[in-house]
Image (cartoon, grey):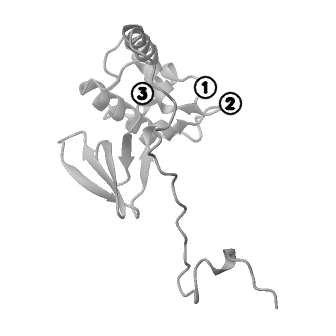
Amino acid sequence: MDVKDIIAIAGKPGLFRFISQAKNGIVVESLLDGKRMPAFTTEKVSALDEIAIFTEGEDIKLSEVFDRIHAMEKGGLAIDAKSDAPALKAYFEKVLPEYDKERVYPSDMKKVFSWYNLLHGLNLLKPSEEKKEEAAEAADSKDHKPAPSSEKPKSAKPAQAKQFKPAGAKGNAGSANRPQKKT
């Protein structure tokens, strides 16, 4: 599953879509009600594509767990996240039999299932194979267009490095880079 730009914010229900970078955080849009709001740098923000589930071997990315649920349910919804702990554990074991039973808690399973069901309800989940097929079809339809040139336009100016002056520093910020006078 492709969960790029989808994030979770600790202490806030649901999931959010990354919209843009702000001065002291990011701007997100709730997938539950569509409202936009800031997520400040003091809040714990987790991107779904960076979350992994503990297993007995290597950790497995959340997107792969979503793929497994999608395949097991044949594109349907997962178990209700409000089910009791033994039912959640049994279902999770069917999806991911190698999960680490000591480090993955029922609360983690609830999040996985509620996130999956939310994304499924909004039609934001497509298995990785479907994404690859769509990309291949799009590439086939663009075969007749000329490839974009990798050359930069001649009018483009090279980026200039900004000089950083630490707080409390005295004198010229770039004086360390100037040649010293010989006396």
Label 3 sits on what residue type?
A: Asp
Report x, y in % for residue 36. 21, 50
Discs 1, 2 touching: Cβ within 8 Å: yes
Disc number for residue 76: none
Q: Secondary structure at mark 2?
A: loop
Label 2 CA crowd tier, 10 Å (few <14, some 14–19, many 20+) = few
Indicate which label's residue lies in the foreground, 3 or 2.
3
Q: Is residue 162 left or right of residue 130?
A: right
Disc number for residue 2: 3
Where residue 77 sits, quadrant-wise, is top left
Q: Secondary structure at mark 3?
A: loop
Label 2 sits on what residue type?
A: Gly
Figure quadrant of the C terminus: bottom right
Query: In the image as oriented, which residue stretches furthest toward the front?
Result: 154
Q: Which residue is mark 1?
A: 98
Label 1 sits on what residue type?
A: Glu
Q: Nearer the viewer, residue 43 or 139?
A: 139
Q: Which residue is mark 2?
A: 57
Q: Is residue 147 above or below residue 164?
A: above
Give the alpha-carbon distance from disc 1 to disc 3, as whole Å.
22 Å
Q: Nearer the viewer, residue 180 or 72?
A: 180
Label 1 CA crowd tier, 10 Å (few <14, some 14–19, many 20+) = some
Indicate which label's residue lies in the foreground, 1 or 2.
2
Residue at x 61%, y 77% (from the top left corner): 174
Label 3 CA crowd tier, 10 Å (few <14, some 14–19, many 20+) = some
